[in-house]
Amino acid sequence: MAVGLATVTAALQGQAETRFALVPYPQSLTAQEGTFKTAKPAEEVWKVETDGQLPAEGYRLRITPDGVTCAANDKAGAFYAAQTLAQLRSGKAGAFTYPCVEITDAPKYKWRGVLIDDCRHFFGKEKVKRVMDLMAQHKLNRLHWHLTDDQGWRLDIPGYPELARHSSVRAASGKHGTRPHVRMKDYSALLNGETYGPFFYTEADMKEMIAYAAARHITIVPEIELPGHVYAALSAYPELACFPERLKGKGPLCAWGIEQDVLCVGNDKAIKFMEDVLDYVCRLFPGDTVHIGGDECPQVRWKTCPKCQARIKANGLKDEHDLQPWLTRHFLKFLDARGKRAVGWDEYLLGDVPKNAIGMSWRAGGGGAGHKFLTPLECVKRGHDLVMTPRTHCYLDYGQGLADDPFQYIGGRVTLEKCYSFDPCEGIPVELRGHIFGGQGNNWAEYTWNEYDLDWKMWPRTCALAEALWTAPSRRDFPNFLKRMETHRKRLIAAGVNCAPLR
Ligand code: ACM
Ligand code: ZN
């Protein structure tokens, strides 16, 4: 990348990459002579002031030999100043040293996210807390938590006990190195025969996680998938599917792919089920948004389902293509009445969907899974706000191009440099860029079994995404990032993170 090399190099003043190995890099940094020495961490002895001129989440930090002052306009700003100080610190308790510097900083984008898929493989409270610790250190502020899918349902819901009892357990998983897929005639030989689960969060667990997130200025965005990717729930409550007999005696899927048995949109009981789930989710999670999935929903069952066909007729819809937008409109209103905005994968914007629906654009680089899709430009032209997560730059379950990599990937390739080159506003005219909230790295977990595997795929690529979302393009430069990462990767490894090599 050639962006801003001269500016960055000048600002860094020679050897500053190692002296100020900050990730993400601040918007303005002026190195100064000298150091500040202190027995306690600087954020315990600093002076903090409020500056109403600073933007949301922004801060100003001044380190002199005599002490540290921080100015911020909100608590998040002071929190991010403390994260910067932690990266500037050397020495140990009783004898810390900080380089003298003046930093003025604020994020480029307000949505700086990470998706954790707890359905395909389950990570659990302690591992997700660790992800949040690392997110905070990199000034990331949205945990998009994928809690329901074909292969598992991970949230206890009052009134639907079978979700925790039945839908959180699958009979087996694919053996390491295999690729069981729902479209295969028989994948039983690929399965390991080990019961997986029960794995789910109780209300008390979630309250603990919500408080943990809040203390780190992270907003949890819970995702409840509808109307597709819902097989785990349907296997507990077959009457919510178009053809219940197909689900009887079944459990969550043990293979990956796009399942054709989806929610029966013609069935009032199925709508009521999702209303009950989302009503509970709205009350439990304090955040401003709820993700309602919407991706990869085949319509083949709806085509022959009498209830779905009756719904089409009763509402004057054209055919089964109109059912998902009908459902989306219903749940947009439902969430709006509860003070939440809906987010959904880009498919859910197809058809007649009101502007207040936030899109999560994952196929920006081209169509996916044989489905039609709206480009980011088409979405913003229709008035939708967008979170950008193109699989070409943000899918961390894709290979990272390392010569010697012990882990299995779903396919594709997203190198560290590719992550770094992520520009959420690519192809969006200046006057429509206000619709781009930011972006996130997606850690789909079909082939990610545990935290070591997750660490390796997340880091260092999430460092690159964090900088793409925080730092202005004029301050970004890949060779300079790599230099800083030589120091920063050592920090991550010292903290026990199974960080992959830089190249
Ligand atoms: C997706 O990757 N199916 C959103
Ligand atoms: Zn149906």
Image (cartoon, rainbow, N blue to C red):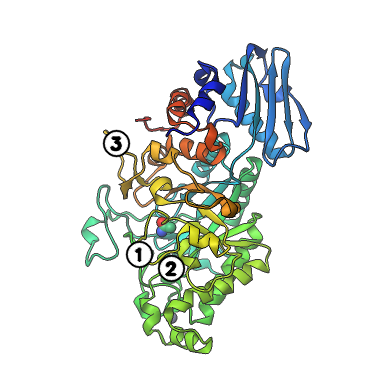
For mark 3, give the secondary structure. loop
Instruction: Looking at the image, tell me whether mark 1 or mark 2 is earlier in sequence order.
Output: 2
Amino acid, disc 3:
Asp
Residues at marks 3 and 1, CA–CA distance in whole angstroms: 27 Å
Q: Residue at x 27, y 53 (%)?
A: 192
Are there few (<14), some (14-19), or many (20+) residues within 10 Å of tag 2?
many
Q: Residue at x 59, y 51 (%)?
A: 220
* Quadrant of ligand 1 in image: bottom left
Q: Nearer the viewer, residue 429 or 298?
A: 429
Q: Which mark is residue 228?
A: 2
Q: Nearer the viewer, residue 258 or 414?
A: 414
* Residue tagged 1: 258
Instruction: Say how many tags the image has.
Output: 3
Q: Residue at x 36, y 80 (%)?
A: 245
* Residue tagged 3: 405
- State the image coordinates of residue 494 (x, y, percent, origin top left): 47, 25
